[in-house]
Image (cartoon, rainbow, N blue to C red):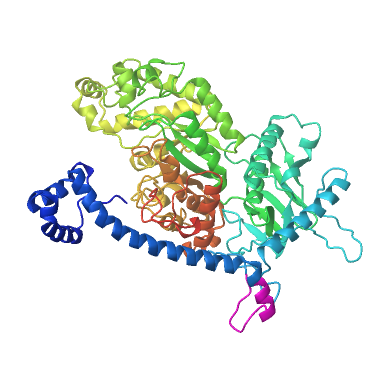
Amino acid sequence: MRRGSGAGGRLEPEESFRAIDEADDASDSEAVGVPVQGRNEKWRQMEVTNSDAMHRTGRSTWRSSSVLKLVVVLALVGIALYGWQTSPVRASAKNLLGKSSSNAQPTAPQTFAPVPHLTPPPQTSAQGTPDLDETQEETGETQEKAGEAEEQKDGGVDSPATSQTAGDEVNNFPETTTVLDKAVNTPWPLPAEFTSGSEKLCLHAGRWAFRHEGPCAGAHATSDGCEILNKAFKRYTRHMFQGRTPPTGPDCYSSASVQVSNSSAYLDFGVDESYELEVSSGQIKVKANTVFGAMYGLESLSQLVRYDALTDSFWILNAPWVIKDKPRFQYRELLVDSSRHFQPIASLEAIIASLPAAKINTLHWHLEDDQSWPVCFKFRRELCERSAYSPDQRYSVSDVRHLVNYAREHGVRVVPEIDLPGHTQALCKALPGICTADLKIVSPAGDGIMEALEGIIKEVSELFPDSFIHLGGDEVGTSRWSSDPRTAAWMAEHHTTPTAVYELFVKKAHEFAIKYGKVPVGWSEIWIAFGTKLDKSSVLQKWRSGDRMSSIVSKGYRALWSDVGDWYLDMLQYTWDKVYRAEPCKGLTDDQCSLILGGGGEMWGETVDTSDVLQTVWPRLGAIGERLWSPKGATISSDAARPRMIEFRCLLNRRGVPAAPLLNSKARMPPPRPGSCTEQ
């Protein structure tokens, strides 16, 4: 802490010393030959003569020396006491007098209070915890024996040895000190079905390997799907062991088998994401129909692994585990807006890489808006030339293809959004001839307007392989058409209205999408405006709280749920528990709920860029992930989910994802004080 100082950085003397010095000056004035008032003034200005300085130094030295003598005496006493505490003489005296008295307690290493959901390890002896030196010596001996046994083996072991001689222990590795409540030690999101036990299994990080079974172990080993799985093996090995390779005993597990039935399944809406995970005293195994289901099995397995720093070892607690899991909803998205703030490829990669932790499977990429058009299509190159923020804030076609492939390797689809006919000011800046005179919105009277829109939708459809394309349709200012002279004349000529022009743009955009093999998605305004006039293949994404989901699904249309009142992540006042409590099928029958494909969190870009997007998204996106993945009956109470959610946020932090404190009143706020991730 900085302390107060006078002008020019000089410190003023304390008032008590000033009064003493003035009295001394009055008695010594004749000896020094300087008037008292003048000398006091010089003291305040720190500009005394050499004789003044010496005169005062004498008195100050006397006071300082007295204090110094006292400090030295106290220091010597302290040193003597410390020497007595640590000396062999004291130890001998203690042995003579007895090792303990009625008030003495056994010496133990320093321990820290556990977090609320952890319980301390049970005491193994009535005599207390052994001395730290003894513990280290025993640990070293055990690890040395483990190393000798390991050297005698030919290669690594997949599972602990099942045979032993009489008196031998099954596991000669130091016991873990980590004890975690079962209610916390569960994968996030909560699996559909699972059982667990009370055993602890150690893992051999240095020799760890995932082994293929099924098609990827044979003729299909070099297929695209198997290559994706191989990359996932490397990624989840890092997640499990955090780059550590500690010395490990020979009886620790060193591998897990992964069996995929169909390695050629392509990532798209409806792909089978189910998996089974078994962790027992005999094996660790993941089974799935597709590569993408297998990756979610690896995600759940990685979340079960715990590192114990005291024994420098990795463990799976509460074994045996049997998990049979599948998602409640097939569509689970995060919307990212790279128009209002440009998100570099590296930032988008970091976002994508974080999504599987909550089993989010879709990146809804809002490519353009009024503010900018950063994507450089081959068709109409002037879009990014004129409407990107700068040459450095653009995406090439190669960038887009790379990102789509990167997302697929993480089990994440990329659904592009081109918003029409509103939110098109950046489009109008690049192509003014197809817009109103004020360049605020596209116009039906524009030169070649429909050809331009079809060309854009065609290239987007070719560039993004996903079957869905989002075409917006929200917040359309139809009054601008009436106030634009050219558009007003066109409407008069065609005997139409602004609402009819709105419908024309929406229907043509959807027709173009269907023509190029896509499922058109639009915001819920288009349903309120046009209802069953929309093609039945259309998917409606509800975002306005006043729009009733029942009115959409009751007519047989499919829907997505992203209500602004609950799942808009730019609303920083929305706490994780509010997000968690939101239910997409509230008030719907089971048949109606079956038409809801899913939904997701919407991270609009007005107040986020690379510097804060991840801590704004996380950990609240985890609440959305569990709501969309886990069975409805298992996600009723946010209070019940709180301990697991706290642990999930700590998991994200351990992986390097900057998930903000969970318990703040607003999202992305920094920690309010020092403390554990489990307390904030």
Front residue of 315 and 401: 315
Q: Does residue 627 appear in the picture of this structure?
A: yes
Q: Position of residue 155 (x, y in %)?
A: 84, 42
- Whether the magenta-drawn stretch holds residue 104 is answered as yes
Q: Is 123 rendered above or below residue 438?
A: below
Task: Answer with left or right where residue 267 lies relative to residue 483.
Answer: right
- Whether the magenta-drawn stretch holds residue 430 is answered as no
* Image quadrant in which you'd find residue 127: bottom right
Query: Which residue is most to the front?
Result: 31
Q: Position of residue 220 (x, y in %)?
A: 77, 31
Q: Position of residue 46 (x, y in %)?
A: 18, 45
Task: Answer with left or right where residue 568 lies relative to residue 99.
Answer: left
Query: Which residue is most to the bottom?
Result: 102
Q: Is 24 rendered above or below residue 458?
A: below
Residue at coordinates 57% horizontally, 31% vertically from top-left?
Answer: 406
Residue at coordinates 54% horizontally, 25% vertically from top-left?
Answer: 401
Which image quarter holds the C terminus? Answer: bottom left
Q: Is 502 rendered above or below residue 553?
A: above
- Magenta range is 91-107
Q: Position of residue 478 (x, y in %)?
A: 26, 32
Q: Does residue 516 appear in the picture of this structure?
A: no
